[in-house]
Image (tube, helix red, strand yellow):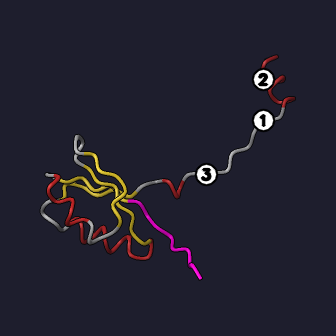
Amino acid sequence: MYKKVERQAMYVWVYSMKWKKKLQHFGTIHYVSPKMKYILIYVNSSRAAEVKKELISKNYVKRVTMAHRKELDEHYVLKSDADKRDNLEE
């Protein structure tokens, strides 16, 4: 049976895009921006801190940041019609 694995997104800024292939070793490459020279990779959440530490030590990496998507609240509440009318009257 399929087991869901929690993943963490990381933005890796590099000096040159020729290092893109090297980053495949650390996780799944999701997006590449040649103009801004960053690569979005997904890694297992359990290894995220370890991978970040290892990436920072590489000489071809400028900066590594974690994506903040997990911190965002994805549950939205729609206002009822009465609330909308009250806001219009004010």
Closer mark to the observer between disc 2 and disc 1: 1
20 to the left or right of 45: left
Q: At 20% from the left edge and 63% from the top edge, which residue is drawn?
A: 21
Q: CA distance from mark 2 to mark 1?
A: 10 Å
* Residue type (three-letter) at the residue carrying disc 1: Lys
Q: At 83% from the left edge and 23% from the top edge, which residue is drawn?
A: 85
Crowding at mark 2 (Cα within 10 Å: few <14, some 14-19, many 20+)? few
Q: Secondary structure at mark 1?
A: loop
Circle 2/circle 1 CB separation < 8 Å: yes
Q: Earlier in the sequence, mark 1 or mark 3?
A: 3
Q: CA distance from mark 1 to mark 3?
A: 17 Å
67 to the left or right of 89: left
Q: Which mark is residue 79?
A: 1
Q: Earlier in the sequence, mark 2 or mark 1?
A: 1
Q: Which mark is residue 73?
A: 3
Q: Circle 2 is placed at which residue position?
A: 87
Residue found at the very far bottom of the displayed protein: 1
Magenta residues, as a range? 1-9
Q: Quadrant of residue 29?
A: bottom left
